[in-house]
Amino acid sequence: MGKETMMEFAGKKILIIVENLPLPFDRRVWQEATALRDRGAQVSIICPMGKGFEKKFEMIDHIAIYRHKLPLEAKNAKGYALEYGSALFHEFRLALKCLRERGFDAIHACNPPDLIYLVAIPFKLFGKKFLFDHHDINPELYIAKFGRKDFFYKLMLFFEGRTFKNAQVCIATNESYKKIAVERGGKNPEDVFVVRSGPNLERLKVIPPVNKWKNGRQCLVGYVGVIGKQEGLSYLVEAAEYIVKELGRTDIHFGCVGGGTDLENVKEYAVEKEVNDFFTFTGRVSDQILLEVLNTADICVNPDEFNEMNDKSTMNKVMEYMALGKAIVQFDLKEGRYSAQSASLYAKPNDAIDLAKNIVALLDDPDKAEKMGSFGYQRVKNELEWEHEKENLYNAYRKLFGNGS
């Protein structure tokens, strides 16, 4: 690769805005930011504060991070209005601050929510470019959370449409999202670039197992991810209940890494089902603990329920499991099957008992699990790793900046 290519975005200044996670904790966005930096761009980020990320401003690896407080983590309509309103105020305030201190040529907006275009519009009037990085399909997310298509669902569609209309270039995490951008958002297919959230094999390292996470049992089933209602941890609790009470298997432990709005509810549900002794819930933890749990796991599980959102969404945890060579059990979802292929067994959608039977069958066939895990690792290494995906990010910015000119 020539020096000219390595510095093709030299002189370009990019402001990335994220509302739902702090940086560098948001792995996808941090990978994008460092990839753009590596091609010569000056990168700044606006994001919320979070546990372990309380500084209002810091430079990390030559990337400037501006952080703001959020009043709460919303759970209802009034809460979302307060959270999003506060975030928009701080994002606009910090965008002005960044413009004065560092400058920017483009705003790179990462949803949710589909409201950051409101921050970008005033700057577009002065020639700043706007790229939309489509992480979540919010209308479908609303259905997953609240189970209805009402006024607020229509409002989600409106905001999504305005975001697509204002974006000159869009990034989609998979082909399903690209289809939405084209068919529902009215985008030209040439202006939509698929950039999958490929795992970084330098971060996701294979390390020796740490047997304390098995809690004295023979087998460990690993899970990592945000724990919200739509993540389906209740199905995993029900699967554990079937495994323990109906199959009489007390040799299996479940290690669940991650936090979220539904974590306490899931813990209470495990107590209600009398299987809490078979679970370890770590909450949000360091990469080291995440790696310890997943490397100790015999297999990994993705209990995301089947709904319109999850069926079309690529889940980072699936590819992280594959990057560590772990066989997977998950419900049969379109994008989950595309990612894992033969690295996973597929249970009937939203059927906890079938999920349980597949978990036990895979644990009882370690040779098969090893072959599946090896397939998954090779698929990540040869096709899905971030090193393969970031070229698509560069293509999106070449389009945005007119082939880097």
Image (cartoon, grey):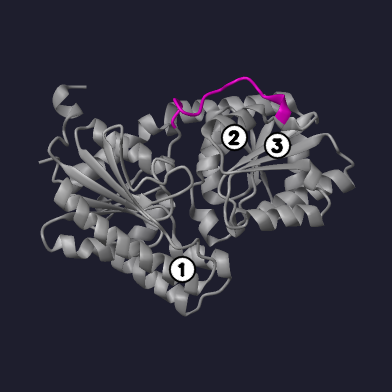
SS assignment at label 3: strand
Q: Quadrant of residue 328?
A: top right
Q: Position of residue 305 (x, y in %)?
A: 62, 55
Q: Which element type, helix, strand or loop, lies under badge 1? A: helix
User: Main SS of the magenta segment?
Assistant: loop
Dot in front, 1 or 2: 1
Q: Quadrant of residue 243?
A: top right
Position of 49 with respect to 350 (left or right) is: left
The answer to whether residue 83 is left or right of residue 358 is left
Of the image marks 1 and 2, the number of the one nearer the N terminus:
1
Tell me which amino acid carries mark 1: Tyr
Say if residue 116 shows up in the picture.
yes
Q: What residue range appears in magenta?
A: 200-212
3D distance between C-alphas at marks 2 and 3: 18 Å
Q: Which mark is residue 342?
A: 2
Apparent side of residue 321 relative to residue 393 in the rendered image (left or right): right
Q: Nearer the viewer, residue 136 or 172?
A: 136
The residue that mark 3 highlights is: 221
